[in-house]
Amino acid sequence: KFRVIVPEDHKLAIAHGAVRYRKKPIIRSRLMNRTYGIAVSVKYDPSVHNKEHFCYNEDGDEVCGDSFLTFVCKGDPVIMNEIAVFDILPDFDKEKVVRIPFYCSEEASLDYLNDYRTPDIIPLAHKVGELCFELPHGDILHKDQRVFTVILDFSSAEIFAAVKYQNTGTDVHTTLDFLS
């Protein structure tokens, strides 16, 4: 049996709920209302990828330039203190600042960041945050040796993102704006 409460001031009710959650979290898991991930370049496979997403990288390799790497899908249950971890490589050797934008989508499943089948290129996801990582001076490693660990942390009411550069152990953090 449930009792439904309709607050007179919804903003105040949200504030009270946030304070209560912070003091004594009683929620153990939740269903994600959006799909979260990043756009990555992967080796192009004509049996898997649409040809609209085909391009060449700086090394002349055939890649799918806007493949969507999903961290969590819309409708998935996420247990508190759960994190998603992926290792990625930068796209270009000459990058001095590596930018990793984070995206969310209303779609439950996403293969690509953009839909090229429409007359205008329509983004299937929108940007909710970005981490910028400045490489150390003198870092002349090939892009295949520059490993970044991307972490999304779902342990609170907000979603935290971090990127750690494995070669130096340094990292940067942000909170994703999932309300926009």
Image (spheres, grey):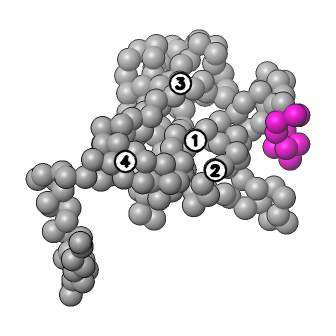
Reading the image, the residue beneath label 1 is: 70
The answer to which image quadrant residue 18 occupies is bottom left
**Cβ–Cβ below 8 Å for labels 2 and 3?**
no
Reading the image, the residue beneath label 2 is: 109
Q: Which mark is residue 159?
A: 4
The residue nearer to you, when weighing 144 against 35, is: 35
Q: Nearer the viewer, mark 2 or mark 3?
A: 2
The residue nearer to you, when weighing 172 against 153, is: 153
For badge 2, the amino acid type reads Ser
Disc 2 to disc 3, C-alpha distance: 21 Å
For badge 1, the amino acid type reads Thr
Disc 1 to disc 2, C-alpha distance: 8 Å
Disc 3 to disc 4, C-alpha distance: 19 Å
Residue 146 image point, x, y percent: 56, 17
User: What range is drawn magenta here?
Assistant: 46-58
Residue 141 image point, x, y percent: 59, 12
Above or below, comparing residue 3 to residue 25 in the picture: below
Q: Nearer the viewer, mark 4 or mark 2?
A: 2
Disc 1 to disc 3, C-alpha distance: 13 Å
- Is 71 included in the stretch rendered in magenta? no
Figure disc tally: 4
